[in-house]
Amino acid sequence: MKKLILSAVAASLLLSSGAVAKEQAANDATVAEVNKIAISNAKEDARNHPAKLVGEAIESLKLAQKAVIALEHKDTKSAKEDLEKALGKLEVILASKDAPKLLPIDNIVQAQEFVGTASDVDKIVKHVKSLLDDGKVQEARALMMPLVSEIDITVVNLPLASYPDALKLAAKYVNEGKTEEAKKVLYIALSTFTQVTQVVPIPLLESTDLIAAASRVAKEDKARALKYLDAASDALDVAEKLGYVSESATTYKMLHDQIKAVEKEIKGKNKAEKLFEELAAKLKEFKSKIISSKNNK
């Protein structure tokens, strides 16, 4: 567990808090190119997760680590100083009335993309069912494993409810000459984290960017706009068939119907600006409620 802390601190120092400009697909980009840029932008967003790393918390962790090392070398004077500094780093945070219960210290981004169409998902699921009927569970399991298309953002958090108290208790033990007890408390404090993972379905990211790309070229290149919208509809199908369910009042069917309405307008008078705006807004709301979170203690 000590390795986790050290890697978290090291990784956090490499992260920049500056905003990163998103790449936009060219107007003549292929569907594959639009999708590639959508995923790339999403990964970059994930790395710059809204839950910003708190510098004071990271410094406090580093100092607590130093205190453990000092105690291992029987240097109680340095351990005391490091623990005092570690607590001092948290004073500003603890004094705030809006102090969070969890302080993010690191984030981990993992992506697994399903490369295929909605029809491909249907074929795999059908084959899996056939294998299960024949009792070939492991073969079915192997086929099921690729049926994932998501970016997982895991944020490692420091619990403010327990960490400062642990440092105070460790300092108390050091003052009392109970170095072994102090080390035990610090080891526990430095291994107690809460991990929160957000799951972001890739097909919905692709659909969003394809619709945006279609809106940009709808006036000049109807054929390309329709191609983007067709691909956006298939991406929605993939998301639905992979089981990404939203709590939104908007349904997959409603999104498909809106895409059809936009396509009809493009083929006709081509005054689809308002329809594009409505479709984008609905998909954004739908996507916000399909992103699920889970806690990993």
Image (cartoon, rainbow, N blue to C red):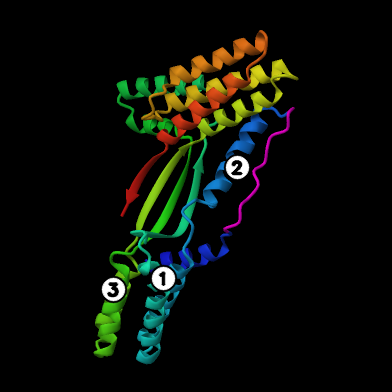
Q: Which mark is residue 92?
A: 1
- Asked if the stretch drawn in magenta spans residue 187, the answer is no
Residue 7 locus on image (x, y percent): 47, 65
Secondary element at tag 2: helix
Q: Dot 1: few (<14), some (14–19), or many (≥20) neighbours within 10 Å?
A: few
The rendered magenta stretch, by its main secondary structure, is classed as loop
Tell me where the magenta segment starts and ends, as one range: 17-28
Q: Is residue 148 above or below residue 172?
A: above
Q: Quadrant of the C terminus?
A: bottom left
User: Is 76 situated left or right of 273 in this image?
Assistant: left
Q: Who's the residue at 58% across and 47% down the image?
A: 44
Q: Which structural element holds mark 1?
A: helix
What's the residue at 54%, 20% (across, down)? 233
Label 2 is placed on what type of residue? Asn
Query: Where does label 2 land, which residue?
Result: 41
Rounded to the nearest angstrom, the CA distance separating label 1 from label 3 is 18 Å
Observer-nearest residue: 127 or 33? Answer: 33
In terms of sequence position, does the residue under pointer 2 or pointer 1 come before the other? 2
Q: Amino acid at mark 1?
A: Val
* Structural crowding at the residue carrying mark 2, measured as other residues with C-alpha within 10 Å and reported as few (<14), some (14–19) or many (≥20): some
Sequence-first disc among 2 and 3: 2
The residue where tag 3 is placed is: 166
- Residue 131 visible in the shown view: yes
- The amino acid on which the numbered mark 3 sits, given as a three-letter code, is Ala
Measured as percent of width and height from the top left, residue 2 is found at 39, 69
Point out the tag, 1 or 3, that comes first from the N-terminus.
1
